[in-house]
């Protein structure tokens, strides 16, 4: 997917919403456990209900790997369903991969070629040779971990270097040598909204994937005020706050759709 295609969808739907498909068998409605593939049935229902308000879906790969072969099959079915029925919606493999070059090349093939995701999240801390293989595929994206929303991110990411910059700033600056705003995005947590202005000073035109709105406590207004550039270059993720909004109710998908709609309406005010 090209940058223009993604931005056109954002403008059309007046939404920057990314729905995280962090599907956990212990949290989905109990009646689905009787189906042949509970994870896929849950995902399909959530997708159908939220697609009108959503420009992106982000399965967290760990939630599928945890169930072995059956979980992986559910992931493949989910991505195939998205690509077949909602090809205009941007897909993210939240895999957080990154290894030496030949291994990264295999990860890139697995997620961007064989599974045909539009993008994959990548850890930058092994340097350029761990990232560049993901950038070789046409109209595919790397989403580089820059400043994450977890509490432990301060252990390294905001530490000041000898040159006076914080480590996440150095990651942003260095990575601009590898990719550009047409193939590289950055993860910046919503709980780090006060750093967004610093991020935008370095990567003004790149898309930012913003996790942490909702259950993790990120504030949507702060994200918009600090992170929105002249173009709508944000993908704002909500996972648990949408997909589990309906609890164990049989109309869980409809409730999730309403939660997605509520966030979309808030975003529309800024678009």
Image: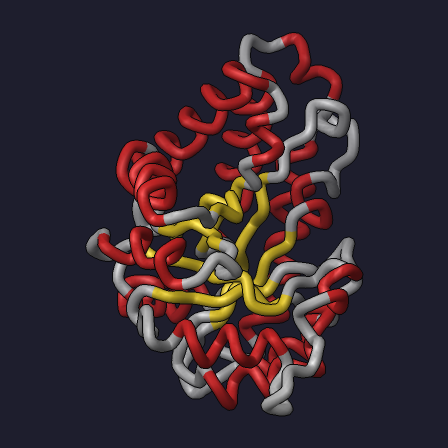
Vertical order, 199 against 42 (above or below)? below
User: Height in image: 250 above or below 213?
Assistant: above
**Above or below: residue 49 compared with residue 1:** above
Report the residue at 71% width, 76% height from top: 159
Q: Nearer the viewer, residue 126 or 230?
A: 126
| Camera sees residue 92 | no
Q: Residue at x 37, y 66 (%)?
A: 184
Q: Residue at x 54, y 61 (%)?
A: 145
Its colouring scheme is: secondary structure
Q: Residue at x 30, y 34 (%)?
A: 84
Q: Which one is nearer the viewer's eye here, 106 or 187?
A: 106
Residue 92: horizontal and vertical position, in percent? 45, 48
Q: Seen from this angle, which residue lies furthest front?
A: 162
Q: Position of residue 64 (x, y in %)?
A: 56, 28
Indicate the position of residue 270 as horizontal and vertical percent values: 55, 80
Q: Quadrant of residue 127?
A: bottom left
Q: Relative to 40, is 125 above or below?
A: below
Residue placed most toward the observer, 103 or 252: 103
Q: Is residue 254 left or right of residue 150?
A: left
Image coordinates for residue 229, horizontal then vertical, percent: 47, 85
In this view, the residue in front, 120 or 43, is 120
Which picture quadrant has residue 248?
Answer: top right
Give the mark count: 0
Q: Residue extending furthest left? A: 138
Please identify the quadrant where the N terminus is shown.
Answer: bottom left
- Is residue 158 visible in the rendered image? The answer is yes
């Amino acid at each position: 997917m090209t940058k223009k295609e993604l931005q056109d969808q954002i403008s059309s739907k007046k939404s920057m919403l990314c729905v995280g498909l962090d599907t956990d068998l212990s949290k989905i409605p109990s009646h689905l456990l009787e189906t042949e593939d509970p994870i896929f049935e849950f995902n399909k229902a959530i997708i159908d209900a939220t697609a009108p308000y959503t420009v992106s879906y982000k399965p967290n790969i760990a939630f599928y790997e945890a169930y072995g072969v059956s979980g992986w099959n559910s992931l493949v079915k989910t991505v195939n369903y998205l690509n077949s029925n909602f090809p205009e919606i941007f897909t993210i493999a939240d895999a957080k991969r990154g290894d030496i070059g030949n291994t990264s090349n295999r990860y890139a093939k697995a997620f961007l070629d064989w599974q045909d995701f539009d993008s994959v999240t990548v850890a930058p801390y092994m340097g350029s040779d761990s990232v560049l293989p993901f950038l070789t595929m046409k109209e595919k994206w790397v989403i580089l971990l820059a400043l994450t929303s977890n509490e432990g991110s301060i252990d390294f990411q905001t530490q000041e270097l000898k040159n006076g910059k914080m480590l996440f700033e150095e990651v942003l600056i260095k990575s601009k040598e590898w990719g550009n705003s047409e193939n590289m995005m950055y993860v910046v947590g919503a709980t780090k909204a006060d750093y967004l202005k610093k991020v935008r000073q370095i990567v003004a035109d790149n898309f930012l994937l913003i996790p942490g709105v909702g259950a993790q406590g990120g504030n949507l207004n702060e994200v918009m005020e600090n992170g929105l550039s002249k173009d709508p270059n944000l993908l704002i993720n909500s996972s648990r706050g949408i997909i589990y909004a309906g609890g164990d109710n049989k109309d869980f998908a409809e409730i999730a759709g309403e939660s997605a709609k509520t966030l979309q309406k808030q975003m529309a005010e800024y678009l």
